[in-house]
Amino acid sequence: MVFRAPRRVADQTRRIHDLLRASIIAEEFGYGSLPSEEELRAEFDAPRACVREALTLLEHEGLIVRVRGRGTFVASGRVWTSLREMHGIVQPTDDSIWHGRMRTQVLDWSEVPLSPPVARLLGRVAGDPVLRIDYVAVLDGAAIGGATNYVRFPEAGNLERSMLRVDFYEMLRLGGIAVARSTFRIDTGQADEHDTELFDVDPGAPMLVFEQIIYDDNDTPVDVAFCRTCASRTTLFSRAGIPAEPGGERREPGVMTAERPTPRGETGPRDGETPA
């Protein structure tokens, strides 16, 4: 297969799309209106057709809403979350959706036999009992995510349906299950009939699909989760860096730190803060 560089016009469209998308995510426009097509054309020194195509791409991604005769506006209802907070092992910031802002709706709470794929991930035998929990996360009255969790016994015996009020991690804490480590596999998919009804999106809309394993403080896998959220309404944030040694010197790349993040429910520096 011979590589062919994109046409200059297509390249301009992509760059305008990237720059406008970055401005929207940085909330430079808030939930207000974007500059007019003519203003954007002048700002980017690009043909109007490139500006229009870039706006069309942003509209298809659910980032903007275009109203004939009124202009282009930033779409509301987007969810912003830190990947570190999604893992459930650090104290969430005050404005985080993980700081008590969500509510849950339980769809299923059943003891079922382990299927082979989940048994493999939990390190158990297929057919062993497991607690299956289906729930929807709700923020500001709208569904933002759905998950099917499989919690192993005997740990699942400490959980009660009434504990799942705010988010899954709070329920585990109330049930005395420590979250010491978790892993995510992040993939993409398309909305099926269930997603269409749950998230009010079109069939085939882009979805983010997560496979998570939660480990306790003995490094034992206690929960496997399969989660879905609407890709056009979700922004994930991640931060990485080389930790500084005492005295301010940064470690060489590849040298790991033994410092343990502050678990949820304990006091300590939050994501992005420096310990005193």
Image (cartoon, rainbow, N blue to C red):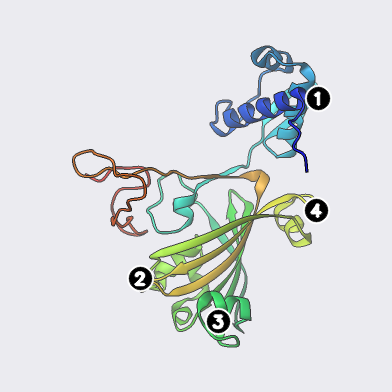
State yes or no: discs 2 and 3 in contact (Cβ < 8 Å): no
Above or below: residue 163 compared with residue 271? below
Q: In percent of the image, x 28 and y 52: which residue is there?
A: 268
Determine whether the residue tagged by mark 4 lies in a helix, strand or loop.
Answer: loop
Nearer the observer: mark 4 or 2; the answer is: 2
Which circle's residue, 3 or 4, is located before the other in the chain? 3
Which circle's residue, 2 or 3, is located before the other in the chain? 3
Q: CA distance from mark 4 to mark 2?
A: 41 Å
Q: Amino acid at mark 1?
A: Arg
State yes or no: discs 3 and 1 in contact (Cβ < 8 Å): no
* Label disc, if present, on residue 203 of the rendered structure: 4
Which circle's residue, 3 or 1, is located before the other in the chain? 1
Determine whether the residue tagged by mark 3 lies in a helix, strand or loop.
Answer: strand
Which circle's residue, 4 or 2, is located before the other in the chain? 4
Q: In percent of the image, x 75 and y 55: which residue is there?
A: 191
Question: Which residue carries the number 2 mark?
Answer: 217
Q: CA distance from mark 2 to mark 3?
A: 20 Å
Question: Which residue carries the number 1 mark?
Answer: 68
- The residue lying furthest to the front in this view is 2
Circle 3 Cα neighbour tier, 10 Å, few/some/many (<14 / 14–19 / ≥20): many
Task: Locate residue 215 relative to residue 21 in the image: left or right.
Answer: left
Q: CA distance from mark 3 to mark 4?
A: 32 Å
- The reply to whether residue 216 is in sight is yes
Circle 2 Cα neighbour tier, 10 Å, few/some/many (<14 / 14–19 / ≥20): few
Image location (x, y in percent) of residue 254 = 36, 50
Q: CA distance from mark 3 to mark 1?
A: 53 Å
* Label disc, if present, on residue 130 of the rendered structure: 3
Q: CA distance from mark 2 to mark 1?
A: 56 Å
> Which image quarter holds the N terminus?
top right
Image location (x, y in percent) of residue 212 = 54, 64
Q: Amino acid at mark 3?
A: Val
Nearer the observer: mark 2 or 1; the answer is: 2
